[in-house]
């Protein structure tokens, strides 16, 4: 979702609250829970999963390995659920020609630096740069080149824009900010 006027451009950034992240976290949780139940079943010598016919699994080494995979999967799943809950990576980009400022805000992980807020003057923006990587995994990234600060990525790493879309976005932003495209 974007909002533009003659002097202000605001672009909302989607964080980790995406359908794909919900699906992966849920699938990983169920799979790791299954591994853990099979490992505990082999330790107890009873079938805890009544949906499937019992298969004898020895606790050492198969049951221990299954339990380990189950616990590791639960840790990774809880990490994914936490990033979804905290909406890590969400925020906004605000370009204000009236005040002559660029504000970039992102939510991070809880702690001292949870709020990532960067401010720059528009006159410090050197250019807009497009980076296209071709190959098996094509990737296109839009950068904001700032004098003395380096390049700041404006697109998400999982944002799959076609070369035409990224060029269009770069041209519109460069025109709005009145800076060249590299």
Image (cartoon, rainbow, N blue to C red):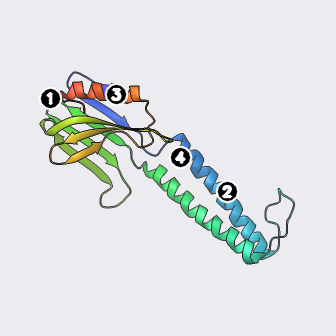
Q: Which residue is mark 4?
A: 21
Image coordinates of residue 3 in percent, x first then y, are 32, 27
Please tell me the numbered disc located at residue 31. Answer: 2
Mark 2 residue crowding within 10 angstroms, few (<14) / some (14–19) / many (20+): some
Q: Give the structural element (helix, strand or loop) at label 3.
A: helix
Quadrant showing the C terminus: top left
How far, Cα to Cα, is label 2 from label 1? 53 Å
Image coordinates of residue 148 in percent, x first then y, are 15, 48
How far, Cα to Cα, is label 1 from label 4? 38 Å
Q: Earlier in the sequence, mark 4 or mark 3?
A: 4
Mark 3 residue crowding within 10 angstroms, few (<14) / some (14–19) / many (20+): some
Above-or-below relation of 112 to 89: below
Quadrant for residue 32, please give it: bottom right
Q: How many dots with numbers?
A: 4
Q: Which residue is mark 3?
A: 167
Q: Which residue is mark 1?
A: 98
Image coordinates of residue 171 in percent, x first then y, are 28, 25
Q: Give the structural element (helix, strand or loop) at label 4.
A: helix
Quadrant for residue 58, please give it: bottom right
User: On the picture, is 43 further left or further right than 54?
Assistant: left
Above-or-below relation of 121 to 47: above
Q: Give the farthest residue toward the right.
A: 53
């Amino acid at each position: 979702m974007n909002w533009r006027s003659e002097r202000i451009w605001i672009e909302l950034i989607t964080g980790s609250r995406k359908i794909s992240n919900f699906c992966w976290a849920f699938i990983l949780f169920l799979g790791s829970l299954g591994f853990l139940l099979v490992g505990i079943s082999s330790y107890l010598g009873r079938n805890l999963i009544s949906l499937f016919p019992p298969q004898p699994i020895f606790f050492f080494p198969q049951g221990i390995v299954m339990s380990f995979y189950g616990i590791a999967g639960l840790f990774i799943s809880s990490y994914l659920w936490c990033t979804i809950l905290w909406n890590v990576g969400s925020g906004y980009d605000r370009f204000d020609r009236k005040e002559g400022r660029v504000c970039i805000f992102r939510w991070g992980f809880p702690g001292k630096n949870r709020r990532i807020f960067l401010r720059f003057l528009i006159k410090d923006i050197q250019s807009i740069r497009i980076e296209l990587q071709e190959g098996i995994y094509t990737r296109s990234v839009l950068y904001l080149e700032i004098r003395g600060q380096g390049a700041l990525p404006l697109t998400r790493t999982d944002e799959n824009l076609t070369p035409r879309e990224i060029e269009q976005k770069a041209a519109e932003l460069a025109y709005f900010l009145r800076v060249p495209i590299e």
